[in-house]
Image (spheres, rainbow, N blue to C red):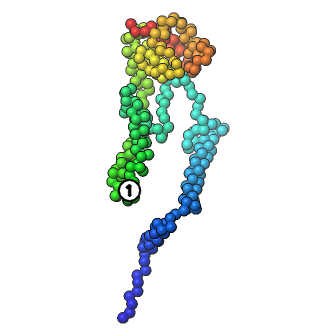
Amino acid sequence: MAAIPKEKPSRIDEARAQFARYKADVKARGKPFYPYAMFHDTIMSLVVVCVIIGLAAMWKWSAWGPGHDPTHKGLLGPEVDPPADPGTTSFVPRPDWYFYFLFYLLRIFKWPESVFLGTIGVPTIALILLIGLPFLDRRRERRLSARPVAMVAAVLTVLSMAVLTWKGATANEALASEVIADVPHWVQVENLPSNALPGAKLFATAGCTACHTYAGAGGSNLGAPDLTDIGTRNLGIDFQIRHLQCPSCVNPGSPMPHFASLGNERLHQLAVFLEASKGAH
């Protein structure tokens, strides 16, 4: 009786058998750090460095615009941004894209009492869970189908980060909407005259409350004073304008930026508003 020829193993069967032999060899003899792990780390590090160098070169040379203008916007943005204008009333500050998720968390936790949760609480808790995961789950099982809790947690984390990043990128920020909503309150408690109203609106939209407080709004940064009753000092319109144009010239050592770019008309509006601010009545 003739022998039945053996069927030639397929490439998949050969690969599985080779992998089984490899795992058995590793289990029996171990896998030395050199050269295996060191080689893998070296290759991965080289790939990362090459990607960084490639992106840097792409950014540099694509931003090298006509006439070597450093503000020319290339594929990855301009080489340098235009000089900051402290007198702008149309700039809406936004973070880099990788902070959009945190940026949108601040819109969710927008109340002063809950800002701590959005900026520190939630990210810190997530980071602690991530660091502690290898110590909490020490099973040898690596199949994704056998780890439903970890898979669901990972999917939910990725989805939440993606949604928050997208919402942060597409958020329509109304310029100084929260601060300018306080202007009618300022007019009421300060009994401001009608000619001080344009200056009050400009004070709200120019970002002055980022450093100064006024009638309970804003925050005190770098020692910036409360301007609620600045008018009681009777400094005068001319002094207020000169101080806004060059704070360090009037008050040596002042960290306040120059606001000369606002123009004489708007500086006068701000000066009228500040001189009319006599405190709550």
Report if residue 11 is visible in the image: no
Q: Residue at x 40, y 81 (%)?
A: 7
Q: Residue at x 51, y 18 (%)?
A: 224
Q: Which x, y percent locates residue 177?
A: 41, 25
Q: Which x, y percent locates residue 72?
A: 60, 38
Q: Which residue is mark 1?
A: 139
Q: Residue at x 46, y 10 (%)?
A: 229
Q: Is residue 24 above or below residue 226?
A: below
Report if residue 37 is visible in the image: yes
Mark 1 neighbour class, 10 Å CA radius: few under 14, some 14 to 19, many 20 or more: few
Residue extending furthest toward the right: 67
Callout 1: helix, strand or loop? loop
Quarter assignment of residue 11: bottom left
Q: Nearer the viewer, residue 232 or 261?
A: 232
Quadrant including the N terminus: bottom left
Q: Which x, y percent locates residue 146?
A: 34, 58
Quadrant including the C terminus: top left
